[in-house]
Amino acid sequence: MPRVSVVIPTLNRADMLSTTIDRIAQQTVSRDCYEVLVVDNNSSDNTQSVLSQKAATYPNLRDFIQLKPGAAATRNVGIREASGDVVLFIDDDIFAEPDLIESHLKYHAQHASASIIGTVVSPWEKSNDPFLRYLRDKGIFNPYSIACNKPMDFSYYHTGNVSTSRKLLSEVGGFNEEFFVYGMEDIELGYRLEKTGCRMAPGPAATAQHEYFPTYKQFSERCQQAGYSLGKLIELHPELRRRFTENGRRTQ
C-alpha cells in the first residue's frame, strides 16, 4: 500500500499537466511509496490522450473524470480513491522538486495529526514584466492570501502544495462542493480541519515551483472569482466575516 496519494485536479492544461506528472514521477522515494491520482474535470483538450500515455509510462498513476464543475468536487474524487495514509494536494501547474514527497513524509513523522504546508516558489524572480515584478515585490502570490498570521493557521491551507492525513480528510467530509468557482474551497477545508484540532505546520523543505505567469487581466479575473468564493465562505462560517473583510492582510 502506498504511503502517500498525490491528488492533482486538472482542466484543459494538457501540455502543462504532462510536465507536472513527469516531475512528480521523478522522486527520491520509490514509486511503490506513492501513487498519483489525476482527476480530469471534463477537459475539452487532449488531456485524456496525455493521461493515457502517462498511465502507460508510470504504473503508479491512475486517472479519473469528474463531470461536476469545480476544484472542490474534482479533488474529492481523489480523496475517495486514495489509498495512502497521507494525501498530498498539488495543482496541474505545480512542478515538484525531486524530494517533495520525501520531505512531506519527514514532516508528518515530526508533526503527528498536522497538515504540512509546503513551499511554493514563484518563477518571477528575474522577470522583466512590470506586473509580475509588482506581484513579486509586494509578495502577492495568490489573490486570496489575505491573511498573514504567525504561527500558521487555516488561512495558509492552499492546495498548491499541502498534505493531510487521509483519515482526517474523510472525517471532516473533504471539500465543500458548494464552491464551484476559483478560490477559498481549500481555506474553508483548512478551517474545518483546524476546528478538529489539526495544526497547520510549515514545511519549508517541501518545495515546488508554480508555473504561473498571469497578466493583469487574468489576475483581476481570479480576484473577482475569489471574491465570490469569499462570500460563500462567510455564508458557511459567519464568524469569519470580521477576520476576512475587516482584518485581512490587504483589506485594511
Image: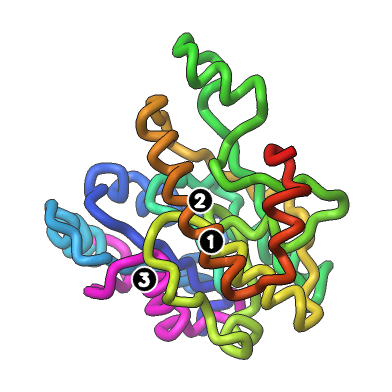
Number of numbered callouts drawn: 3
In the foreground, 55 or 244: 244
Amino acid at dot 3 = Thr
Task: Measure the alpha-carbon separation of dots 3 and 1.
Answer: 21 Å
What span is in magenta?
57-86
Under circle 2, the secondary element is helix
Q: Is residue 248 above or below residue 212?
A: below
Closer to the observer: label 2 or label 3?
2
Q: Position of residue 227 (x, y in %)?
A: 50, 51
Under circle 1, the secondary element is helix
Please name the residue shown 68% across and 51% down the image: 245
Q: Pointer 2: what residue?
A: 227
Reply yes or no: does residue 181 show up in magenta.
no
In the foreground, 33 or 86: 86
Q: Pointer 1: what residue?
A: 231
In the foreground, 15 or 54: 15
In the rendered image, the residue lying farthest to the right is 151
Reply yes or no: does residue 69 show up in magenta.
yes
Q: Pointer 3: what residue?
A: 74
Q: Is residue 138 left or right of residue 13?
A: right
Task: Measure the alpha-carbon separation of dots 2 and 3.
Answer: 21 Å
Q: Is residue 47 left or right of residue 111?
A: left
Closer to the observer: label 3 or label 1?
1
Q: Earlier in the sequence, mark 2 or mark 3?
A: 3
Tell me if label 3 and label 1 are in contact, CB under 8 Å.
no
Tell me if label 1 and label 2 are in contact, CB under 8 Å.
yes
Q: Position of residue 150 (x, y in %)?
A: 86, 50
Amino acid at dot 2 = Gly
Task: Measure the alpha-carbon separation of dots 1 and 2.
Answer: 6 Å
